[in-house]
Amino acid sequence: MIFVIMGMEVHPFDRLARAVDELARTGAVEDDFFVQLGTCKYEPRHARFERFLSFGDLCEQIRRACVAVTHAGAGSALSCIEQGKHPVLVPRRSSLGEHVDEHQLPFAEKLEAGGLATVAREMEELPAAIAAARSMSAPAEALGRARELTGWLETYWQGLGGGRSNGRRGLRALGPRRR
């Protein structure tokens, strides 16, 4: 099963919901899809979905999935990595009304550069990204790095506006370790 996470963002991510439904309809990806749909207006006809899941159920679905596909929100991406997955990240775009700004793309690219995720920038890239992610898992050190970043994000969000230099230092936790 391929688990798709839209998160809890108030802006719908219909572009991803439609793309996943089309993959399920055509069989372009050989597996069933289960979608955490969130606030999407589009409802898949060829994939199972639930609007929202408890955090425990979300983590269970991530563990059970052969591949996790998620919007590039920090919480969803890091939850996938913490569960041992190498997620496919699909950044939301503010230009399409999917978010308030374009922060998801640089975050996703940082995870990809660190070997922790694969990014699908366009929906046409999803089948290849899913195929690549099938054979990968999060490296053992990724769990610690994901927890380190989660801690940093919690601290940053609590003191929102704590300065951009803190943001750059925190994102370095995602990159390859220098020895």
Image (spheres, rainbow, N blue to C red):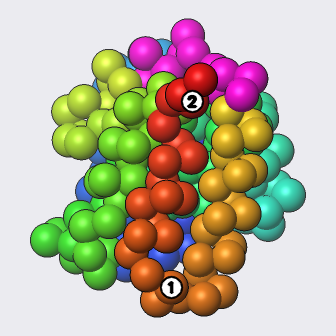
Q: What residue sits 68% from the left and 59% below the top?
A: 150
For disc 2, the marked residue is 177
Q: Residues within 10 Å of mark 1 (few under 14, many from 20)?
A: few
Q: Nearer the viewer, residue 10 or 158?
A: 158
Q: Earlier in the sequence, mark 1 or mark 2?
A: 1
**x, y (%) of residue 93?**
23, 64
Q: What residue sits 41% from the left and 34% below the top?
A: 112
User: Image quadrant of residue 41?
Assistant: bottom left
For disc 1, the marked residue is 162
**x, y (%) of residue 122?**
20, 41
Q: Nearer the viewer, residue 132 or 154?
A: 154
Q: Residues within 10 Å of mark 2 (few under 14, many from 20)?
A: few
**x, y (%) of residue 26?**
32, 26
* Amino acid tagged 1: Gly
User: What kind of element bears circle 2?
Assistant: loop
- Determine whether 67 is above or below 81 in the image: above
> Over which residues does the magenta segment extend?
130-141
User: What kind of element bears circle 1?
Assistant: loop
Mark 1 and mark 2: span between their CA atoms? 25 Å
Q: Quadrant of the C terminus?
A: top right
